[in-house]
Image (spheres, coloured by chain):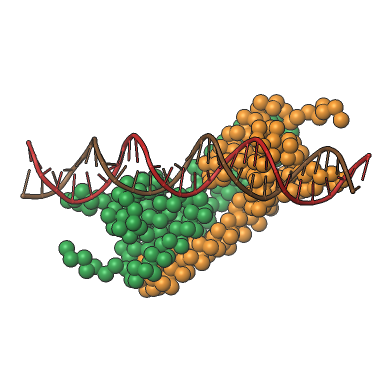
Chain colours: A green, B orange, C red, D brown
Amino acid sequence: MTDEKAPDRDPEAVSKFVESFAAQLVEAGLQRMPARVFAALLSSDAGTLTSSELGERLKISPAAVSGAVRYLAQVHMVSREREPGSRRERYRVHADQWYEALTNREAVIKRWEHALREGVDSLGATTPAGRRLAETLAFFEFIDGEIVAMMERWRVHREKLFGSQ
Amino acid sequence: MTDEKAPDRDPEAVSKFVESFAAQLVEAGLQRMPARVFAALLSSDAGTLTSSELGERLKISPAAVSGAVRYLAQVHMVSREREPGSRRERYRVHADQWYEALTNREAVIKRWEHALREGVDSLGATTPAGRRLAETLAFFEFIDGEIVAMMERWRVHREKLFGSQ
DNA sequence: CGCTAGTTTCAGAAATTTGTGAAGTTAAGG
DNA sequence: CCTTAACTTCACAAATTTCTGAAACTAGCG
């Protein structure tokens, strides 16, 4: 229980990375706490941290951890694991899984497509505006398929770079 | 000049589309005013509207229009045109241009890559965490190239669907 | 069974963001 | 030049979001 389990590298450097990467995620639209929690997990050696570890490293309350993790789990950027025989939870980032989630704006795109379809209908498919919406819709439909294929190629490519696992 | 220039279709229906599409954009991270202004432009027959037309349709102040348009222009989702011989401005959405802007998260991705590179350096490329970051970095580098190629294919595909222009 | 370590929920304080009215700026047109 | 139409900037009020401490909940473990 004497916590001499080598915090990964210089905590200073880690923290610096965490905050700067989190800032970029925020810039891209993620909320601040989820961004920080996520970055912290990403930079942990095991790829997992407990709630209290997160609280300490980021200097935030258990409530904040709880909220951030709930969000991240919802969008599949982290998963939660129960340590067997303990009420303590571990939160894990799967390197490969998270950017798939990120790319997978599927739900978002589907809703856009839906709204666009309604737009085409109600404005009339032959009006100039209707045609513009139809083209946009076609674009997203195209993208849908492309992304799937792209991720396939990535997995092959990844294999080449890093080997199996 | 008697304004009998058919407002594109049923204003009710248009407004309904505008608000619902804008809501989806907001959901995806855009601010509310830019989203509404953008949706309004998208659903206009000419693909352009003046500042005051936007103000009327969306029931917002000139200041709000100004702010929204500034943002949209910055991210290349709309362009501004001066009507020759008038102080009045028109804002235009290029159907093809805007989703290219949308896909073009280039700047964002570059910054992520930068942050990740720093992370790999400071955590050490051989640590587990460092390796995780390196893999993520490789993913984004892969994506960079893919998106360019994808947009090429889209242009070909678009041609097929809608003919030239 | 009750105690306790761990997490979640909740109400509210604090910070941030958003949109407005009003004043400021610019250039067109007399 | 002066007036006026059109956009922009700015200070601030209002709305929203974010984070916290405290209370409530839950399940191990003695």
Q: Give how far across and how far down residue B140 sits, in percent.
A: 51, 62
Residues B7 and A75: in front is: B7
Residue A90 at least partly seen:
no
For image coordinates 79% across by 43% down, the residue present is B88
Q: Quadrant of the N terminus of chain B?
A: top right
Residue A3 shows in this picture = yes
Nearest the eye: C20 or A44: C20
Front-most of residues B109 and B68? B68
Pick the residue in front: A14 or B165: A14
Number of residue marks: 0
Q: Position of residue B80 (x, y in %)?
A: 74, 48
Residue A9's spot in the image, x, y percent? 33, 71
Q: Quadrant of residue C8?
A: top left
Look at 55% across and 63% down and name the residue there: B110
In the displayed structure, would residue A162 be above or below residue D4?
A: below
Question: Residue drawn 43% across and 73% down?
Answer: B121
Q: Viewed as shown, does residue A82 lie left or right of B81?
A: left
Specify whether A162 is left or right of A80: right
Q: Is residue B73 above or below residue B21?
A: below
* Residue in the picture at 78% in, 48% down: B81
Would residue B104 be found to the left or right of residue D18 on screen?
Answer: right
| Residue A21 percent across, percent down from the top left | 46, 61
Examine the rendered structure and indicate whether residue B139 appears above or below residue B68.
below
